[in-house]
Image: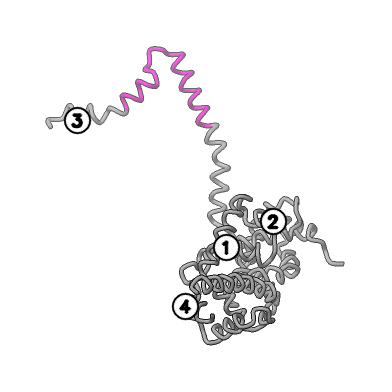
Amino acid sequence: MDPTDTELIAAVLNGDAASFEGLIRKYQPKVFATARRYARRESEVEDIVQEVFIKAFQKLASYRREAPFEHWLMRMAVRTCYDYLRAHQRNRETPMSEMTVQDSDWLEQFVAAPGRDVQAADAARLIIEKVLGRLSPAARLVITLLEIEDRSVKEIAALTGWSVSLVKVRAFRARAEMRRLLERLDVEKYL
Amino acid sequence: MRNRLKKSEAFVKTGLQNTIIAAAKKAAPSDRVPFAFEKRVMARIRGLSGVDVWAVWSRLLWRAAGPCVAIMLAVSLWAAFSNHQNPALNTLSEDLESSVLAPFASLRDSPW
């Protein structure tokens, strides 16, 4: 039988660092999926995940076992992703005006038939990345957690360490920022 | 005509925003893990868990803080007690004042 999280954590805290490998193996898929929401290049994703686990190892003594280890680790993952977004704020994605032919085709298709299932298209994914890539770090984090992952304001507050009211304010600003970004798209061209 | 255009533009933008979010929900990121990734992280962790000179230094400083405070208290008590027993000697404040002003006293004596 596999050792539980509690047993592995106790072993690591007693000096058996090798036991931490069990925790990495168990939770790395979740941390990878989280990191891929914020970083595009695979090398950056790997750097983020590595940083999350190193931080977790270094701060393991501060884990108070009031909540499951997974919650504690995911909080660390979200905060590391936010730090990554802030650090890479300057070299954001290409401007919205620089849309590829594929993006324009997808937009045209959407405007022509909004009800059709075009979401699966690669162009849709590209345009999402472009829109999210242009948002500020806080806005991107809030839009991802609130709108895409469907998390509650309380959950986001717990994950980010922000107060509930700050999450609400940032969500309001993030939606406005996203609206402004979409306004920059030359929608008139497709009408 | 312009109003109609604005209305349809707003409709498209709202629809576009909803579609983008819906598409992002559908396109859940992969949870694929590169081969032997945990080994790579463990190698980094093993590298980190070597002797941290700064941690050792700060631990030593913290350990030394207690005895230092004890010595300081003992010396202060001794100084206060010995002065109290021999009132003919200068007080601690007088001694301090004369030590601080000693360079100025020597300046006053010099020809400059």
Q: Which residue is mark 3?
A: B107
From the viewer's perspective, is residue A110 above or below residue B47? below
Q: SS of the residue at dot 2? A: helix
Q: Quadrant of residue A108?
A: bottom right
From the viewer's perspective, is residue A146 above or below residue B2? above
Dot 4 alpha-carbon crowd within 10 angstroms: few under 14, some 14 to 19, many 20 or more: few
Q: Which residue is mark 1?
A: A175
The lab-note entry on whether marks 1 and 4 share a chain reads yes
From the viewer's perspective, is residue A169 above or below residue B62? below
Label 3 to label 1, Cα distance in Å? 73 Å
**Magenta segment:** B71-99
Label 1 to label 2, Cα distance in Å? 18 Å
The lab-note entry on whether marks 3 and 1 share a chain reads no
Q: How many numbered circles are shown?
A: 4
Q: Which residue is mark 2?
A: A155
Q: Is residue B90 magenta?
A: yes
Of the two numbered discs 1 and 4 on the same chain, state the one appearing first in sequence: 4
Q: SS of the residue at dot 1? A: helix
Q: The disc labelled 3 sits on which kind of residue? A: Leu
Q: Nearer the viewer, mark 4 or mark 2?
A: 4
Side of A54 relative to A6 (left or right)? left
Coordinates of residue B109 in the picture (x, y in percent): 17, 27
Label 1 to label 4, Cα distance in Å? 20 Å
Of the two numbered discs 1 and 2 on the same chain, state the one appearing first in sequence: 2
Which residue: 72% across, 64% down? A20
Label 2 to label 3, Cα distance in Å? 71 Å
* Marks 3 & 1, CB-CB < 8 Å contact: no
Q: The disc labelled 4 sits on which kind of residue? A: Ser
Dot 1 alpha-carbon crowd within 10 angstroms: few under 14, some 14 to 19, many 20 or more: some
Q: Which residue is mark 4?
A: A97
Q: Nearer the viewer, mark 1 or mark 2?
A: 1
Q: Chain of mark 1?
A: A
